[in-house]
Image (tube, helix red, strand yellow):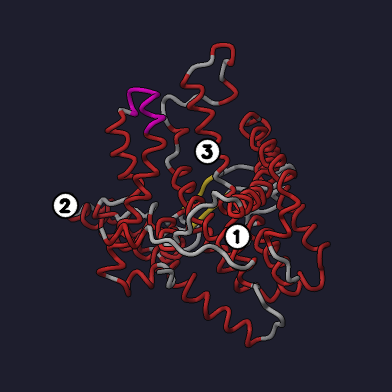
Amino acid sequence: MNFFKELWAPQPGPRTQEEMQSQVLDFLRFPMTFWVLLVHVNPHLSPFFTPIENIDFSNFTFANFYSIVARLTNVGGHVVLCFFFFTSGYYFFYKTKTWNFSVYKDKIKKRWHTLVIPYLLWNTIWYVSNLARELFKYFKKGMPDDRWQEIATNYLNPESFLDTYWTATEWAIGRVNIFGWDTSLSGPAILPLWFMRELIVMALLSPIIYWVVKKGKVWALTFLGMCYVLNAWTIPGLNVTAVFTFTFGAYLALNGKDILSTFAPLKWPATIIALSNLFLNIFLTEDYEAYKQITMNLYCIGAAIAFITWTTVWFKSKRRPAIRPNLWKTGFFAYASHALNFGILKIWFLANAMAVANFITGAKYSVYGAFASMLIAPLLGMAICVAVYYLMKRYMPNALKLLVGGRI
């Protein structure tokens, strides 16, 4: 009972514009994190999924409806990283009036605790637990030589070990932009944490970002925005999405601009840009992959602005949402932990939730079950993450504090 009481404890509404901005952005973080889980359920891998270009709209079925919803949620979820990069850039430079080595040192020291230590810990947990699993299998099978060679190559090799923290996972392999340049992606062992990898690099390069904003002004931001829309590069640690959106947030902060006031006039244009590009993206075939990347990025920046502006409208209305900061604080833990495979323990929060949801809905046998599972699995996965967060907060608070960078 105390668990739910603490989780659901309300907070007074905003009294100033600054508090309004803080609460709007904090409020969005939790549903954005949930959207990450919804994307990682991968509903497009269901046997009932039909590629959009193959749908016969003259003979529309529930399986076709399921497929469109699955694509909308998957493509739509890409706004999450754009939102998080933007707000991270904004708060990194928030109220920064000058720049010198002392300022830089203080900011890096803070990010060491909030970014670097959690990033290293989460990926190390993955490495140790999965190495333990492979060693257990090795001894169980009688220590065969070929198995040992595989373990040595995948886990004990220095290059493989370092890849755990940088490029252990890859996706969108072979993808190119409109210039024909490679735009494949990679991340650390826990794939979603590629976002943190980029933030760490952005923090280290913050003197350059400060200089670019101060000297290049809106022209530099416009150039980076064009590079972002065209998806010009996806270099690990310097992904163009991170570079532009982090710098965009930095630009507003360093120029003393309030996010809510700045974005308010863009409410409808941003919404139109987001929706039009979202539907363009899901209905364009793979033959237009380079153009799908452009529509994706236009959607993301439009959607990020739209979500902020419409949430602000909601907060200013008579039916504004309740402020529940204790619930929102669980977001980072859920983001980092949901995709962690604990190896030998066979614990994988989201995958376990998906298995339960698939079983109770009969997702393998019915498209209706698959649709229900698509909605239940991320809810169950989020509930597991929140429950584990509060168990750790009660019984292992120091360990939790290290894992979430003090976000408790």
Residue at horizontal 48 percent and vertical 55 percent from the top: 322
- Quadrant containing the N terminus is bottom left
Residue placed furthest toward the top: 58
What is the x, y in percent for residue 15? 59, 67
Q: Residues within 10 Å of mark 3 (few under 14, many from 20)?
A: some
Residue under circle 3? 73
Residue under circle 1? 85
Residue at horizontal 65 percent and vertical 86 percent from the top: 101
Q: In the image, what residue type sits under mark 1?
A: Phe
Let me know if residue 130 appears in the view: no
Question: Between 137 and 39, which is closer to the camera in this rendering?
Answer: 39
2 vs 1, front mark = 1
Residue at horizontal 38 percent and vertical 68 percent from the top: 403
Q: Would residue 370 be found to the left or right of residue 229 on screen? A: left
Confirm whether the magenta stretch covers residue 366: yes
Let me know if residue 379 appears in the view: yes
Distance between mark 1 and mark 3 Cα atoms: 20 Å
Residue placed furthest toward the front: 318
Q: Residues within 10 Å of mark 2 (few under 14, many from 20)?
A: few
Q: Callout 1: helix, strand or loop?
A: helix
Q: Callout 2: helix, strand or loop?
A: helix
Q: Mark 2 or mark 1, which has the lower sequence index?
A: 1
Q: Mark 3 or mark 2, which has the lower sequence index?
A: 3
Distance between mark 2 and mark 1 Cα atoms: 45 Å
Residue under circle 2? 140
Q: Which residues are magenta?
A: 363-372
